[in-house]
Image (cartoon, grey):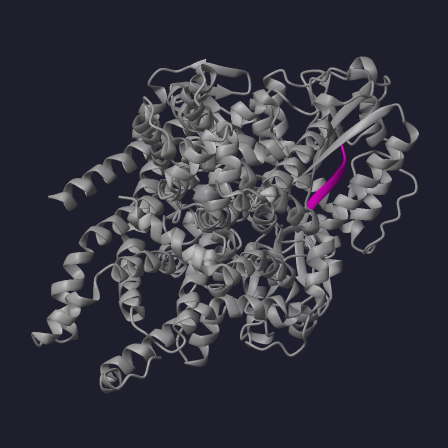
C-alpha cells in the first residue's frame, strides 16, 4: 500500500541515494576543475594572490621548459603505447586457449600491474643503476661497454618507457582477453571448415571483431600515459637536466618546489586541454 | 590441458613456439620482482658491487628489521591501511547507493546525473590537486586522515559497476519488500546489497589497490612524516640514511604483500573489473 | 520475500566506517586547531640524517620537560620535502611558530613580512654571542629573526686507504691546498693505482656543494651589485666546462649532480675516492656506513682564486609571525642556548655558530674538526651575500638542473650558463 508519505518517499529516495556521490563529484571534481581555471589567471607570491590576467599563459608560451615537458610527454606516450598495446594483444591471443599453467602465466603478466608505480620505479632504478645495476653487470660479462642508462640523457626516456611497458602490459592484456573471449567459438569453427589456418583466422575474424576494443585500449593507454608521474618522480625526478620531465611532474615541481602556484594551475589547464583534444581526435579517427 | 584426441592433433610446432615464448615472456615479467627480492635480502656490500649476483651469499634478514623500525615504516603501513580501508568503506557505500538509485528507480535527471558522475572520469588528478590542496587548507584537512581519504574517493568506476550489477537484480524482489512495508533504505541495505557481493568485492578490491598504491595526492596533502603513507615513505627516503639500499627494497617487498595476497585470493574479481573497463563503451 | 537473504548484512562496511570515523575525529583532535592547552607552539624541522632527527627531537623534548606549560606540536620533514612543506603552509596561511630553516629560504619570508623581530624578547647582547658570518643569516634590516645552529663547512672527503695505496698525502694547511690541475693529476693517479671506478665525485644534487668551485675559479652567480647575472661570464662558463670535462674524462662519477645515483653509497663502497664538496654534516652517516675503508677530510682546492673557497652555512632556527611571540622566542632562546649549541655540535660533528663555547667535545672524529674550523674561514664575502639574497633560494634548483643538463651532455657550457643567467635575472628583477 503506498501511502502519500510513502509515495513522496519513493519520489525523493533516488535523489537521496545518488546525493552523496553527486556531492563528492561536484565538490572534489568539478569545483576544483573550475577553480583551477580561475587560479590560472592569478599569481601567487608569499605576500598573497594577485590577479594576473593572461600573464601566466604568455609566460607558458615563452617557457622553454614547458615545451620540453610537452615534447617529453609526447615522446613518452609514443614510446609506451604502441609496444604496450601490441604486446598486450599478442599475449592475450596467445593465452586465449587452454594451456598448461594458463592461470599462472596470466598472473605473471598481470602482477607488475598490481605493483605501485613507486615500487616499479624503485625496482627499475636499481636495474638501470650505472654502477650497481644488473644490466651493466650483464653487459660487462659479455664484454660490451657499460651504459649510463638513466644518467645518459639519450637513454633516460627509453629506460623509463621500458619500465612503464613492463608494468602496463598485463592490464590491457586482460581487456583484450575479455574481448577475445566474447568472440563466439563457432565463428572460428566455421572458418576452420572453410580451411582457414591460424593466421587467416586471426586476420579475418579476430582483428575485425576486436577493432572497437583495440581502439578503446589505445585511447585509454594514451590518456593514462599523459598522467605518468609516480615512476618518473622516483626514478629520475625529471632529470638529468629535464630529460625526463613530463607535464604532470612539471606541474608538481612548479607548484610545490618553485612556489609558483598560479603558473602551475596554468600548466594543468593546458595539459587538460591537450588530453581532451587528443581524445577527441582519436575518437574521430577511429570512428571514421 | 584438455587432451581430446582432436586437440592433440593440433599441437603443432607453432603452438609449441607460442607456448615457449609465452612462458619466457612470463619469466621476464617476473624477473624484476625477483631482483627486488634479491636486493631486499642482501647486505650492503653485496648490493653496492659492480657485478651483483642473483642469490645473496649472506641473507640479510636484518634489512626488514632496519626498514621497519628505523624509518617509521610501521607507522606508514598503519596509515596506508587506514586510508585504504576508509576509502573502500566510503566508496563501496556511496557507489552502491548511487548505483542502486540509478538502476532501480526511474526519475527525472537520471541519465544526466549518471553522465555527470561518469564525466568526472575525464577530470584527471593533476588539474584538481592545486585547488584541492587550497580547499584542504581552508577546511584544516591538511595532514589528516580525512584529507587523505575523502577528496579522492573514486566515483565513476564503482558507480558504473554497481549500477550495471544492480540492473540485473529482479525488480519483483524489491516490489515484494516494498509491499511488506520496508523503507527504501532497507530495500537497499537489506535486500539489494547482500545480493551484490561479487560487485562489491570487485569494487572494494580496486579501491583498495588504487589507494594503497597512490602517490600524488598523499604527497601533496601530507605535511609531516607521521602521516606518510607507505608509497610516500618509499619515494621519499633519503639517500644518506641507513634505510637506503637493502632496507628500502625490503620495505617495498612488504608493501606489495597485501596487494599480492588479495590478488592471489581474489584474482577473478580483478579480471572482471579490468574487463569491465573494456565493456564500458 | 526472501527473509533468509536479509541477514547477510555487509556489516564489515559498517565496522570499517565506524573505525574510520573514529580515527578521523581522533586525527582531527590531534591537530593544533583543536588543542585544549593554553599555549601550543607549532614547530617544524627538517633532518638529513638519522642522527640529526634524534638530536633535534631530544632538544625539543628537553624544552618540554622544563616548560610543561607550553605544548609543542612538532612536525618533521625531510630536507627534500622542506620547500614543499613551507610553500604549502604559506599558501594555506598556516606557517609554524618556530622552524628550522635552510638558510637560503629565509630571505623571501623576511621580505614578505612573515617573520617576527625578536629584539624585544631577547637579551641585549644576543647578537654578539654568535659568529657574525652566520648571524647575518638571521639578522636582516636590523631585526633579529632567529639564530643559527651548527655550521656545515664544505671541504673534500677522501678514502684514506686509497690515498695510502696511491702514495698521496692530503694537504693539512690551507696554503698547501691543491690547485685544480693538481687535483686532476691526483685523480688520474688514483684511477691507475687503486680499485676505484671513478676517482672523483661531487656532493648530492645540490647547488651549494658546487658553488665553491665556481668561486674557486673567480666566478660568481650574480654581479656584486646584484643587478645582473655573472654566471655566464668567462669565469663561470669555465667552471661549468671544467665540471663537464671531469665527467667526460670519466674522472667524476656520473649521476650525482643529476640526482640519479646514491652519492653516499658511491663513496662508502669505494667506488669513488674523493668526495668533492661534502662536509662535516656527512660525518655521522660516514661513521655509520663506511665500514670497509677509512676516510679523511682535507681542504678545498685553490683554483684561480688562490684560496680554498668554501661554503659554510647551515640551518637556522627562525620564528615566524607567531600569535604567541613570547613563548616562541622562549623556545628559540632555548634552542640557541650554549648547552643546545654544544649538544648539536658534539652529536652531529658540527662547528658551533656561537663564539666561545665551552664543553665542546665532538663525539665522532674530533681529529677532523679543527680542519673544518679553519676551512670555514675561507668563505668569500660575495658568496655569503649571494647565499642570503632572495634570488638564491628561488633559483637554486633550476640552476642545478641546467648544470645537470650540461654535465650529462645535453647542453654546452655556454648554453647552460646562458640559461642559468636567464633564470637568475628573472628573479633579480622581481
Residue C189 sits inside the magenta stretch: no
Is residue C329 found left or right of C161 in the rendered image? right
Is residue B224 found left or right of A199 in the rendered image? right
Q: Could you say where residue C87 lies in the image, as x and y percent from the top left?
A: 57, 28
In the image, farthest residue toward the left: A194
Q: Could you say where residue B13 lies in the image, as x and y percent from the top left?
A: 24, 85
Count of numbered circles on the image: 0
Q: Could you say where residue B106 lies in the image, as x and y percent from the top left?
A: 33, 27
Q: Nearer the viewer, residue B211 or A232?
A: B211
Residue located at (50% from left, 46% from top) = B204
Q: Could you say where residue C405 lies in the image, as x and y percent from the top left?
A: 41, 48
In the depicted structure, whether residue A34 falls above or below residue C53: above
Q: Nearer the viewer, residue B200 or B20?
A: B200
In the depicted structure, whether residue B14 falls above or below residue B170: below
Q: Main secondary structure of the magenta part?
A: strand
Residue C253 visible in the snapshot: no
Is residue C70 found left or right of C78 in the rendered image? right
Residue C149 sits inside the magenta stretch: yes
Residue B100 visible in the snapshot: yes
Magenta residues, as a range? C148-153
In the depicted structure, whether residue A189 falls above or below residue B203: below
Q: Nearer the viewer, residue A7 or B43?
A: A7
Q: Which image quadrant is residue A11 in? A: top left
Amino acid at each position: 500500500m503506498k501511502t502519500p508519505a510513502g509515495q513522496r518517499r519513493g519520489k525523493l529516495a533516488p535523489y537521496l541515494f545518488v546525493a552523496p556521490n553527486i556531492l563528492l563529484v561536484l565538490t572534489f571534481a568539478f569545483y576544483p576543475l573550475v577553480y583551477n581555471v580561475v587560479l590560472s589567471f592569478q599569481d601567487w607570491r608569499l605576500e598573497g594572490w594577485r590577479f594576473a590576467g593572461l600573464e601566466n599563459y604568455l609566460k607558458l608560451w615563452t617557457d622553454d621548459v614547458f615545451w620540453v615537458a610537452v615534447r617529453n610527454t609526447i615522446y613518452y606516450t609514443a614510446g609506451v603505447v604502441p609496444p604496450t598495446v601490441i604486446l598486450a594483444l599478442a599475449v592475450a591471443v596467445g593465452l586465449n586457449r587452454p594451456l598448461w599453467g594458463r592461470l599462472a602465466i596470466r598472473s605473471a603478466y598481470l602482477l607488475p600491474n598490481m605493483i605501485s608505480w613507486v615500487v616499479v620505479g624503485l625496482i627499475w632504478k636499481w636495474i638501470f643503476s650505472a654502477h650497481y645495476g644488473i644490466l651493466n653487470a650483464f653487459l660487462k660479462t659479455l664484454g660490451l661497454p657499460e651504459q649510463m642508462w638513466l644518467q645518459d640523457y639519450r637513454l633516460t626516456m627509453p629506460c623509463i618507457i621500458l619500465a612503464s611497458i613492463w608494468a602496463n602490459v598485463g592490464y590491457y592484456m586482460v581487456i583484450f582477453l575479455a574481448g577475445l573471449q566474447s568472440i563466439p567459438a563457432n565463428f572460428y569453427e566455421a572458418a576452420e571448415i572453410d580451411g582457414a589456418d591460424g593466421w587467416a583466422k586471426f586476420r579475418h575474424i579476430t582483428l575485425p571483431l576486436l577493432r572497437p576494443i583495440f581502439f578503446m585500449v589505445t585511447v585509454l593507454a594514451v590518456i593514462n600515459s599523459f598522467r605518468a608521474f609516480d615512476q618518473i618522480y622516483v626514478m629520475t625526478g625529471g632529470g638529468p637536466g629535464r630529460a625526463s620531465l613530463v607535464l604532470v611532474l612539471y606541474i608538481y615541481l612548479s607548484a610545490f618546489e618553485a612556489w609558483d602556484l598560479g603558473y602551475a594551475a596554468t600548466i594543468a589547464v593546458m595539459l587538460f586541454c591537450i588530453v581532451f583534444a587528443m581524445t577527441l581526435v582519436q575518437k574521430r579517427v577511429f570512428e571514421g | 590441458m584438455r587432451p581430446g584426441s582432436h586437440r592433440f592433433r593440433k599441437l603443432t610446432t607453432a603452438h609449441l613456439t607460442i607456448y615457449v615464448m609465452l612462458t619466457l615472456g612470463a619469466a621476464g615479467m617476473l624477473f624484476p620482482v625477483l631482483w627486488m627480492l634479491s636486493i631486499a635480502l642482501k647486505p650492503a656490500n653485496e648490493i653496492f658491487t659492480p657485478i651483483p649476483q642473483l642469490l645473496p651469499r649472506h641473507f640479510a634478514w636484518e634489512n626488514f628489521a632496519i626498514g621497519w623500525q628505523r624509518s617509521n615504516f610501521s607507522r606508514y603501513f598503519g596509515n596506508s591501511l587506514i586510508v585504504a580501508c576508509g576509502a573502500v568503506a566510503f566508496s563501496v557505500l556511496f557507489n552502491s547507493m548511487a548505483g542502486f538509485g540509478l538502476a532501480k528507480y526511474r526519475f527525472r535527471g537520471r541519465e544526466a546525473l549518471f553522465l555527470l558522475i561518469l564525466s568526472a572520469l575525464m577530470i584527471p588528478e593533476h588539474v584538481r590537486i592545486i585547488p584541492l590542496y587550497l580547499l584542504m587548507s581552508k577546511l584544516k584537512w591538511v595532514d589528516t586522515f580525512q584529507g587523505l581519504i575523502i577528496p579522492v574517493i573514486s566515483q565513476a568506476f564503482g558507480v558504473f559497476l554497481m549500477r550495471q550489477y544492480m540492473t540485473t537484480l529482479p525488480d519483483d524482489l524489491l516490489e515484494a519488500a516494498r509491499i511488506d512495508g520496508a523503507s527504501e533504505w532497507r530495500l537497499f541495505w537489506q535486500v539489494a546489497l547482500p545480493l551484490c557481493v561479487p560487485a562489491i568485492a570487485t569494487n572494494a578490491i580496486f579501491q583498495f589497490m588504487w589507494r594503497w598504491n597512490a602517490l600524488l595526492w598523499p604527497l601533496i596533502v601530507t605535511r609531516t612524516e607521521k602521516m606518510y603513507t607507505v608509497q610516500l615513505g618509499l619515494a621519499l627516503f633519503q639517500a644518506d640514511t641507513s634505510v637506503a639500499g637493502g632496507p628500502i627494497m625490503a620495505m617495498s617487498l612488504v608493501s606489495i604483500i597485501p596487494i599480492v595476497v588479495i590478488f592471489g585470493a581474489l584474482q577473478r574479481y580483478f579480471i572482471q573489473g579490468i574487463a569491465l573497463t573494456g565493456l564500458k563503451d | 520475500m526472501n527473509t533468509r537473504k536479509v541477514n547477510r548484512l555487509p556489516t564489515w562496511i559498517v565496522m570499517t566506517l565506524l573505525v574510520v570515523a573514529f580515527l578521523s575525529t581522533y586525527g582531527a583532535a590531534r591537530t593544533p586547531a583543536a588543542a585544549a592547552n593554553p599555549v601550543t607552539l607549532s614547530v617544524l624541522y627538517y633532518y638529513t640524517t638519522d642522527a640529526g632527527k634524534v638530536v633535534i627531537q631530544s632538544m625539543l623534548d628537553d624544552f618540554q620537560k622544563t616548560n610543561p606549560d607550553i605544548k609543542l606540536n612538532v612536525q618533521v620533514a625531510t630536507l627534500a620535502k622542506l620547500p614543499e612543506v613551507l610553500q604549502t603552509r604559506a599558501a594555506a596561511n598556516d606557517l609554524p611558530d618556530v622552524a628550522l630553516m635552510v638558510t637560503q629560504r629565509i630571505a623571501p619570508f623576511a621580505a614578505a613580512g612573515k617573520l617576527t623581530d625578536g629584539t624585544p624578547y631577547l637579551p641585549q647582547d644576543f647578537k654578539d654571542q654568535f659568529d657574525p658570518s652566520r648571524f647575518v643569516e638571521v639578522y636582516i634590516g636590523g631585526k633579529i629573526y632567529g639564530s643559527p645552529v651548527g655550521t656545515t663547512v664544505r671541504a673534500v672527503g677522501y678514502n684514506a686507504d686509497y690515498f695510502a695505496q696511491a702514495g698521496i698525502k692530503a694537504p693539512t694547511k690551507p696554503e698547501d691546498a691543491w690547485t685544480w690541475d693538481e687535483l686532476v693529476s691526483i685523480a688520474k693517479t688514483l684511477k691507475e693505482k687503486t680499485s676505484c671506478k671513478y676517482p672523483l665525485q661531487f656532493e648530492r644534487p645540490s647547488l651549494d656543494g658546487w658553488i665553491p668551485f665556481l668561486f674557486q675559479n673567480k666566478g660568481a652567480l650574480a654581479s656584486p651589485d646584484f643587478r645582473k647575472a655573472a654566471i655566464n661570464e668567462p669565469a663561470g662558463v669555465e667552471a661549468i666546462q671544467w665540471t663537464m670535462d671531469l665527467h667526460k674524462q670519466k674522472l667524476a662519477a656520473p649521476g650525482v649532480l643529476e640526482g640519479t645515483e646514491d652519492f653516499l653509497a658511491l663513496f662508502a663502497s669505494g667506488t669513488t675516492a674523493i668526495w668533492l664538496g661534502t662536509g662535516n654534516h656527512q660525518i655521522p652517516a660516514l661513521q655509520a656506513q663506511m665500514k670497509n675503508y677509512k676516510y679523511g677530510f682535507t681542504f678545498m682546492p685553490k683554483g684561480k682564486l688562490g684560496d680554498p673557497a668554501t661554503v659554510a652555512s647551515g640551518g637556522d632556527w627562525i620564528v615566524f609571525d607567531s600569535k604567541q611571540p613570547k613563548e616562541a622566542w622562549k623556545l628559540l632562546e632555548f634552542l640557541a642556548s650554549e648547552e643546545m649549541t654544544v649538544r648539536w655540535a658534539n652529536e652531529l660533528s658540527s662547528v658551533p655558530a656561537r663564539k666561545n663555547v665551552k664543553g665542546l667535545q665532538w663525539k665522532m672524529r674530533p681529529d677532523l674538526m679543527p680542519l673544518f674550523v679553519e676551512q670555514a674561514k675561507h668563505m668569500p664575502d660575495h658568496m655569503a651575500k649571494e647565499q642570503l639574497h632572495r634570488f638564491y633560494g628561488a633559483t637554486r634548483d633550476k640552476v642545478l638542473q641546467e648544470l645537470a643538463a650540461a654535465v650529462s651532455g645535453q647542453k654546452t657550457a655556454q648554453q647552460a650558463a646562458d640559461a642559468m643567467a636567464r633564470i637568475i635575472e628573472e628573479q633579480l628583477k622581481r
